[in-house]
Amino acid sequence: MNHTFGLGLGLTAGALVGYAVGVSVSYPGRAFSVTVVMIGITLAAVGFEGGNGP
C-alpha cells in the first residue's frame, strides 16, 4: 500500500468519526472535519496506484 493512500484513508476515517461526533456534540472547529474528509479522499485518490505503480 502506498503511504499517500494510507494517509488518505486514515485522514478520511478520522474525519468521519469527527463529523459523527460533531453531529451530536458541539465543539470548536468541528467544521474542519468536512475539509479533512475532502483532503483525505484526494490523497487516497492520488495515492491509489491501480496496479500501474513501480
Image (cartoon, grey):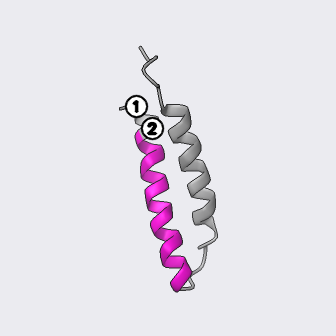
Residue 3's place in the image compared with 19, above or below, is above
Residue 2's mark? 1
Label 2 to label 1: alpha-carbon separation: 5 Å
Residue 42's place in the image compared with 26, above or below, is above
Magenta part mainly helix, strand or loop?
Answer: helix
**Crowdedness near tag 2: few (<14), some (14–19) or many (≥20) residues, C-alpha within 10 Å:** many
Amino acid type at mark 2: Phe
Q: Residue at x 46, y 25 (%)?
A: 50
Q: Residue at x 49, y 32 (%)?
A: 47
Look at mark 2 in the image and give the residue it sits on.
5
| Chain part drawn in magenta | 6-24
Residue with the most extreme left position: 1
Residue with the most extreme bottom position: 25
* Left or right, 50 with reference to 45: left
Q: Position of residue 39 (x, y in %)?
A: 59, 49
Q: Position of residue 4 (x, y in %)?
A: 46, 36
Q: Position of residue 10 (x, y in %)?
A: 42, 51
Residue with the most extreme front position: 50
Q: Is residue 9 magenta?
A: yes
Q: Are marks 2 and 1 in contact (CB under 8 Å)?
A: yes
Q: Position of residue 54 (x, y in %)?
A: 41, 14
**Crowdedness near tag 1: few (<14), some (14–19) or many (≥20) residues, C-alpha within 10 Å:** few
